[in-house]
Amino acid sequence: MRESKKLLEEKIGREVKSFAYPYGSFNEYLMKIASLIGYENAVTTKLSSTLNDFGNIYSMKVSLWGDPIPFLSKENFFMKELWPYVVTHFNDIQVSYMRNRGLKILRWDKLLLWLIQLLQNKDGYLFLLFHSKHLENRNEWFFFENIIEYMVSLNCKIITVSELARSVFALRRI
C-alpha cells in the first residue's frame, strides 16, 4: 500500500489521499494500515444499504457499480429502488441470469441514468464506482461520458472520493 501510494504520487505529481481495496477485500488490519500510511479514506466494493450509508471512512461503501451489476440481493437500498425499473425494462437494460450469481445488468448505463433521475430531488449522495480498466476492456467509456454529461445537465455536483469523505465524515484516524 505504501509503495503504491509513493509510485502514484511520483507519477501524477500530487498527493494520493484515497485508496481502493483490490477486489474490495479488506479487514481491520488493512484499515489501520491505510490510516497509518496517510490515506484519508479507503473504498470497498460493498454496497450501501441506504442513501447515506457509507460505513467507516476506511471502508466506504458504494451505492452502485458502473459495471455489469449482479443483482444478488434486493436488500440493498438502491436495488429496492431500482427493482420496478428492472422488471419493466428487462430487455432494454439487457438483463441476463448467471447461475449461482443471480441477475446481471449489462446496460448498467441506462440503469444509472434512471437512478440519477429518480434521486435528483432526494437529499444524499449517490456514490458510483467505475473501474477504468473495465470501461476500457469493454469499450464502455461512452457510457461513462453519457452519465457524466447527464449529471452535469441536471446540475448535479460531481465530487471525488476524498471530497465525499470530507463531506460525510469528520476526517479522523482510526
Image: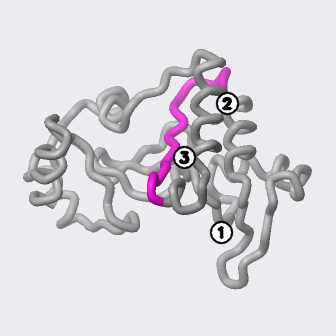
| Mark number, residue 72 | 1
Q: Which residue lies under the disc numbered 2?
A: 119
Give the color scheme: rainbow, by chain, secondary structure or one colour. one colour
Who comes first in sequence, dot 1 or dot 3? 3
Where the N terminus falls, by quadrant? bottom left
Please tell me whether mark 3 sits on a helix, a strand or a loop: loop
Dominant SS of magenta comes to loop
Q: Picture coordinates of residue 71 (x, y %)?
A: 68, 64
| Mark number, residue 40 | none
The residue at the point 64 percent across, 44 percent down is 143
Is there CB contact under 8 Å for labels 1 and 2? no
Instruction: Please give left or right for residue 37 compared with residue 158 in the image.
Output: left
Q: Is residue 42 shown above or below 30?
A: above
| Residue 29 lies in quadrant | bottom left
What's the amino acid at mark 2?
Leu
The residue at the point 29 percent across, 50 percent down is 42
Q: Is residue 120 shown above or below 86?
A: above
Tell me the magenta residue range: 120-133
| Residue 165 lies in quadrant | top left
In the rendered image, residue 103 lying in the magenta stretch gets the answer no
What's the amino acid at mark 1?
Leu
Who comes first in sequence, dot 2 or dot 3? 3
Please tell me whether mark 1 sits on a helix, a strand or a loop: loop
The residue at the point 65 percent across, 18 percent down is 154
- Few, some or many residues within 10 Å of mark 1 (<14, 14–19, 20+): few
- Few, some or many residues within 10 Å of mark 3 (<14, 14–19, 20+): many
How far apart in space, not on screen, are marks 1 and 2 (Cα)? 22 Å
Q: Picture coordinates of residue 52 (x, y %)?
A: 50, 37
What's the amino acid at mark 3?
Ser
| Mark number, residue 63 | 3
Is there CB contact under 8 Å for labels 1 and 3? no
